[in-house]
Image (tube, grey):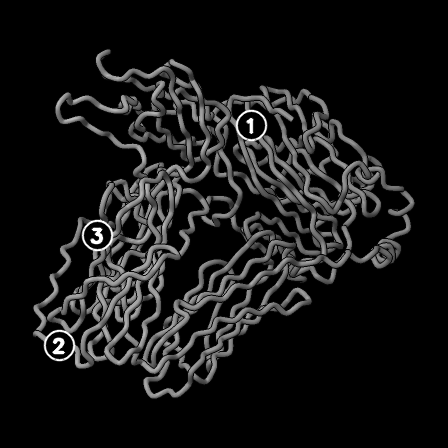
Amino acid sequence: MKTIEARTRRLTWALLAGTLAVLVVMGLSLLLSRFHALAQPAVEIAALTVEKTANTDVAEPGDTLIYTIRIQETGPEVTLWMTDTLPQEVTYVDGSLQLFGPGSAGSAGGVITWTASNFGFGNFAVVTFSVQIPSETTATQVENTAQVTGTGQLVMDSANTTILSGQLPTSQIRSPDNGTVITQKGLLAISGVAWDASAPRPFPGDPVLLPISNFDGGGAYNVKWTAAISAENYILEEADNPEFDNRKTYPSTSATQQFVGGQGVGTYYYRVKAYNAEARPSRWSNVESVVVTQPTWASSASSVPAIPSAPDMPARVSASGPVTVWVRIDAGTWQTATATANPGGWWDWTYEWLLPEEDNAQYAIHTQARDAVGSLSLIDTITVTLRNRNYMAYFPLIFKRWPPICYPPTLNAITDPEGDGAYAVLWSYPYPSTYPQPINYTLQEATNASFTTGVQSYSPGNTTSQAISGKAPGTYYYRVQGNNTYGPGEWSNVQSVTVVPPYYFDDFSNPNSGWPQVSKTVIPETASRYRLLYENGRYRIMIDAGGPPIWFHHPDALAPYRPPTDKYCVETSVKLERGKAPYQNWNYYPYWANGGLVFGATEDNKGIYAVCLTVGGGDTMGWFITSNPVYSYPRVGCAYQGENGGGPRGGEPAGVLSISEWHRIKVGVDGNRAAVYINGVYKGSWGMSGLSGTTRVGLIGGDYEVTPVDFRFDDFKVIPNAACTP
């Protein structure tokens, strides 16, 4: 009896979807012959890039090299394989292999491997590992090549390192730090340390901070860095600005990562420093940042640890005699620095640079050393930025400021209470009329606290406020200056505001965001099952081929969020796939496959409202809006054709939508009415009894009895208490 009912429903739906009835009458054999006649999909051209780097271009026998391989695929999803066969000049350091991103990595027999399936659309992975150069090596060069394939092409990149004899001297700049912003005038003391082969390495290598992954915008993530040569432990610093004015220090660790939790909304900056067995520090690493848009659980961080002081070293003089140190600014002339023997066997050196007065000008500082036998070190380089053009000059007799430019205004704290990117920036100029007064103001906005990215200027005139609107989610920084006839004044303090979206959004990049993950057998005899899962930043609903007992099998996935009222806009992107694992042998689209957006479901999941895309008589797709008051999860969801106020209400026949593309479905619910938008086009509004009492939302996919179905979803969004816009 159930089989007859199912066939009746299938035939009714076939007529509604625009499929010729004769196709149904001709039976299964004709259906399968039609499948074999379908055209094969076009070959998709991949856009694969591979970049391999080493932590140094030059090394000595006994040194450890750290390799980093970055793999990115900007084209369609593919399966990729990487092999990296280590050259005989080095040996792999056990346990050093790390993977950041999708896929799996391994090492065996001197070969590093990595593989990932469904890798594409901008995905990237980073593989790092260490190798050691034997102390007895006689080699002069190490060339290490990574090869990646899987797209019909072979992409390779190499990292080359020159092996020195171990007799070269070294000179290292220790102050200022790399990336320092210099606001002073006059002489800047540049200092560092030099050493030759007669002294042990005094400082560990500099660690490299890796990009910080925080796909869900939560307040919990891992900060990771590369291992540094001769490092015993590491200190990680955190701040809310890239200058680290207000910093927090994490406990010392011998690991190369730190878990961070309990962070509030905002932007956080990190840098790391290594310490050797004598507690001597490396230089600071590069700076990486992460944006938190929603807080999570408590932090595991503790208070600032005490760094042990370096032990006293016995006096020792370099066996090879004095070391000569030079310093050069940009491409200028090399100048001799003042070098003084250190009790540890090294040479402390200093050089004074007469600073030019420039605003936002970047300079490179180089140093090089020569030992007593004439061997030259490699050139060590850092960069600094000068911001010292605007300054105050005082006449000692009359104590007047000249030129009388404006003092810094006071910028108020900024909030975005509605979370809609519309807010006011307010400030004051708290100085009496005897002080220089502004004629007008300039307000500056940026996406970082150093005002080097996303910079935009506003001209509010002589008012002390500026209305801002239309800002996308993110953190924005502001500062303001007064201007008068003598020029621009000093910048105010910096204030920031974080725009947090007032809606629910899931791009499925976090597999723990709360959607159901199910793998359930529905026909034990054929091991047919349905699956609901996250995969490569998307959500996937799959139904195996099974035969008549699972006609119109339609599992849904309800979101871990529900609108607070019966007025909301819910939307998602949906695509029907074909030829993807595990269905790679089914390179055709199934008839009567239905899948789309659930915009209402009862508490017991026995009533459902949905907009479903559907396949017609071949490679064509249409859509319809439906309600099913007798839904029995996971059976007969979109495909219900019964009475009692259910069944399709409206839509368009097969052929109006491209079957091979993504489609954006929006439904605006207001009580018992539902308005439909597809790909930004308004399609109509329908009255649907009982809708106002069903505010659960989600996704649905549905099958036909003899073919598997594979629906993909992305960018699910719900805006509460609002109507949809195209």
Q: Is residue 161 visible?
A: yes
- The quadrant where residue 167 appears: bottom left
- Which tag, 2 or 1, sits closer to the chain's start? 2
> Residue 346 location in percent, x, y?
18, 71
Which amino acid, mark 2? Val
The nearer-to-camera label among 2 and 1 is: 2
Q: Secondary structure at mark 1?
A: loop
Spatial distance from mark 2 to mark 3, Cα to Cα?
25 Å
Which amino acid, mark 3? Ala
Spatial distance from mark 3 to mark 1, Cα to Cα?
71 Å
Residue 48 sits above or below residue 453 on the image: below
Report which residue position mark 1 lands on: 694
Which amino acid, mark 1? Thr
The nearer-to-camera label among 3 and 1 is: 3
Residue at position x 60%, y 58% in the image: 118
- The quadrant where residue 310 appears: bottom left
Residue 69 sits above or below residue 553 on the image: below
> Residue 517 location in percent, x, y?
52, 50
Q: Secondary structure at mark 3?
A: strand
Residue nearest the viewer, comparing 497 with 452: 452
